[in-house]
Amino acid sequence: MRHNLEASLHLLNTLSGWQSGYGGSSSSSSSNVVVVLVEVVLVLLVVVVEVVEVVVVVVEVVVVVVVVEVVVIVVVVVVVVVVVVVVVVVVVVVVVVVIVVVVVIEVVV
């Protein structure tokens, strides 16, 4: 940002020097208007560039936040699925063990 501002100021100073070096007293008013218009356009361009840079930074931050949120959501979903699978496996194993014990007791008795 600072580099853009410094470059614009250097260009404005160059244009001002050009205008004062080549403009006569009678024709200097029209060249003054041209130089002022060029200066205004350059300043507006610098402002537009700065605003675009800020918008790009904001978009980058938003993208990073969204990516982090998506990663967190995926991790939470994976953890929940793993916990559910483990619970289901434990319940199935307990049921099978109980059935086997009951069958063994029936056979022995």
Image (cartoon, grey):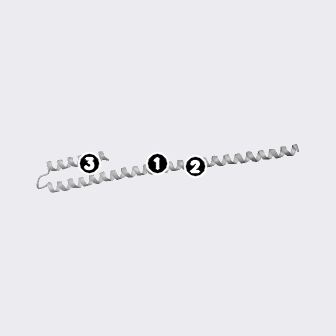
Residue nearest the observer in this picture, 26 or 79: 79
Residue nearest the observer in this picture, 77 or 7: 77
The answer to which of marks 3 and 2 sits earlier in the sequence is 3
Q: Do the numbered discs 3 and 2 sit on residues whose CB atoms are within 8 Å? A: no
Q: Do the numbered discs 3 and 1 sit on residues whose CB atoms are within 8 Å? A: no
Say which amino acid is labelled 3.
Ser
Side of 74 relative to 108 (left or right) = left
Residue that label 1 marks: 64
Side of 8 relative to 55 (left or right) = left
The answer to which of marks 1 and 2 sits earlier in the sequence is 1
Q: CA distance from mark 3 to mark 1?
A: 32 Å
Say which amino acid is labelled 1.
Val
Residue at screen point 32% across, 47% down: 1
Q: How many marks?
A: 3
Count neighbours of disc 3 (C-alpha within 10 A) and say few if under 14, some if 14 to 19, many if 20 or more.
Answer: some
**Label 3's element?**
helix
**Label 2's element?**
helix
Count neighbours of disc 1 (C-alpha within 10 A) and say few if under 14, some if 14 to 19, many if 20 or more.
Answer: few
Q: CA distance from mark 1 to mark 2?
A: 18 Å
Q: Is residue 30 above or below residue 82?
A: below
The label shown at residue 6 is: none
**Label 1's element?**
helix
Residue at screen point 43% across, 49% down: 61
Say which amino acid is labelled 2.
Val
Q: CA distance from mark 3 to mark 2?
A: 50 Å
The answer to which of marks 3 and 1 sits earlier in the sequence is 3
Residue nearest the observer in this picture, 18 or 93: 93
The image quadrant of residue 97 is top right
Residue that label 2 marks: 76
Residue 18, horizontal then vertical, whole percent: 17, 48
Residue that label 3 marks: 8
